[in-house]
Every structure is written in structure tokens, then in C-alpha cells.
Image: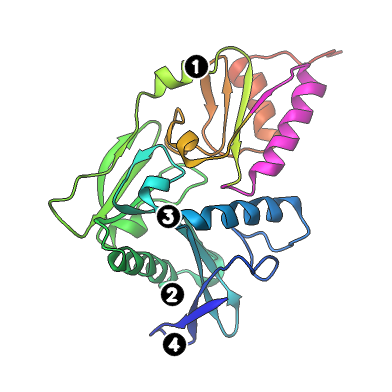
Amino acid sequence: MKTSQKPQTQVQIIEMTPKDAGKVPLCGHKNPSKETYQHKFQWIKKRMSEGLKVKMPKTQDEGIVGYIEYVPGEHAWRAVNAEGYMFIHCIYIQWKRCKGRGYGTLLIKECMKDAKNADMNGVAVVTREGTWMVGKELFLKNGFEEVEKALPDFSLLVKKFKKSAPTPSFKGQWDNKLKKFGKGLTIITSGQCPHNVTMVNDIVQIAKDRYGIEPRIVEYKSYRQAQNAPWPYAVAGLLYDGKLVADHTISGTRFRLIMEREIGIDVKNKC
């Protein structure tokens, strides 16, 4: 486990290594015996050969209090064109305990440092106004600019080091890509988000028991598949009859609401 002392008092940035299974939390998952933890950790190990880095701020009193994951843009697991940039997949801070301490900015600067050391054009990230993903405010205050939007509330933000560099963009053509999935219920998943394990298990069971539906599971196992997804987030979602009905990881309860209230599916054997 590599560490480097930062100027901020009693704060270290820890960089995950392939030997750190069970030693550090992953996106809030702390128990290495859980399937969610192992699924994510194995995904990280495979992606490290593509330049993926995971770093975390650690304080003496509170331990690890956040997480950032980034990778060279050509290997990004989002539906973006970001070659020549470092791309941030996700960032989080334990806000209730650590809000206002500057840890988010600290992690972004760590990413920017690595991007500059690699002589990249800058750093890019996808944010959104809705649930699940980080909002754009943290990045705007760190010098990022919004360069493109996508429905319903996704934004592509960029911090350029070289003004003449090409600007990252969304892959687009969302509707055409959605049509390829055809009729029925499709779950899109990947190892990029540990919560996907629970989502897939819950939805498969509910779909069979409650609606008599056998869902199709599509697991993206490469960045190329993720970059060709029919919406920006790419790595977790739900499609029904070729339409995107959930654009991030959802719970079993949310799945039932979508099926019954939004799509209008009847409950199997309802009395």
C-alpha cells in the first residue's frame, strides 16, 4: 500500500495496490467476505493494467474518509470520447463527518497531478443533478467547465491543461443503441459498481416471482462495451422493450414501482 503525505495536517492519500483486498473499504463496502466487495476488488485489479487508480484520504483519527477512482480516458467506463484525458469514474466523501474539510478538492488535485505527470490534456468527469452520481458543483469550483449535456440530467465536465486540445464528448446516438436490445426486460451491469451485485440478484428474483419474467442480463466486461452503452453512466441500468427505465443502480423496491406504476406490468397470480 503506497502512501504520500499531503500538506493538509494529518491527512494522507492512500493508493490502492493489488495486494490490498480486505484492507481498505471500496465505495463504502468494508467487509471483504461479501460478494459486493470481492466483485468490485477483482474488477479493480483487472483494470489496473489499463492505468486505473484508486486513492483515498486517510486521517489519523477517522481512518479512510473518501474515495476517488480514475483511469486514462481511452479506457473510461462511461459512454464518452475522452482520449488524452484522465477520466474520473467516481468520487465520494463521507459528507456527514467530513463536509467542508476540502477532501473532495484534495482528491481532484491528486487526479490532476497524475494527469499532468502523464502529459495528458486534462481531466474529465460525468456528473448529474439526480441521484447516485456526484453533482457538478465540486468540479466547477475546481476550474472544470461544462462542455456537454445529456438527458435527463447528465453533464460532461472538463478541466483542460492545454487550451488547443480536443474537447471530450458524449458518444451519443442513444436511441439507436437502445433499439438493439429489443423487447423484454434487460439488466445492464458491470463490476465497476459494487452495488450492482445486489441490484441484479434482487431484480432477477422479483421479476421471476412477481411478474413471471425471465430478465436478460448483460454484463459489460470491457471499457469498449461500456463506451458503447445507450446512456452516459453506462455501467448499471434497466431497459424494458428497448427503453431505458433506470439509468443507475436501483433497489428491488424501486424496480417494483417502475414495473407497476410506470410501465403498467400486472403482478403474477394477483388475488
Amino acid type, residue under disc 4 in the picture: Thr
Q: Nearer the viewer, residue 46 or 57?
A: 46
Task: Please tell me the numbered disc located at residue 36.
Answer: none
What residue is shown with label 3? 71
- Label 2, label 4: how many angstroms apart (C-alpha)? 11 Å
Quarter holding the C terminus is top right
Residue 208 on the magenta segment: yes
Front disc: 1 or 4? 1
Image point (56%, 47%), residue name: 192
> x%, y% of residue 83?
31, 46
The answer to the question of whether label 3 and label 1 lie on touching residues, with beta carbons closer than 8 A, is no
Residue in view at x 60 percent, y 79 percent: 62
Instruction: Indicate the secondary structure of the residue bearing disc 2.
Output: loop
238 lies left or right of 168: right
**Residue 180: image tag:** 1
Residue 229 covered by magenta stretch: no
Q: Secondary structure at mark 4?
A: loop
In this rendering, is residue 270 above or below 32?
A: above
Q: Nearer the viewer, mark 2 or mark 3?
A: 3
Q: Amino acid at mark 1?
A: Lys
> Which part of the image, by quadrant, shows the N terminus?
bottom right
Q: Which residues are magenta?
A: 192-217
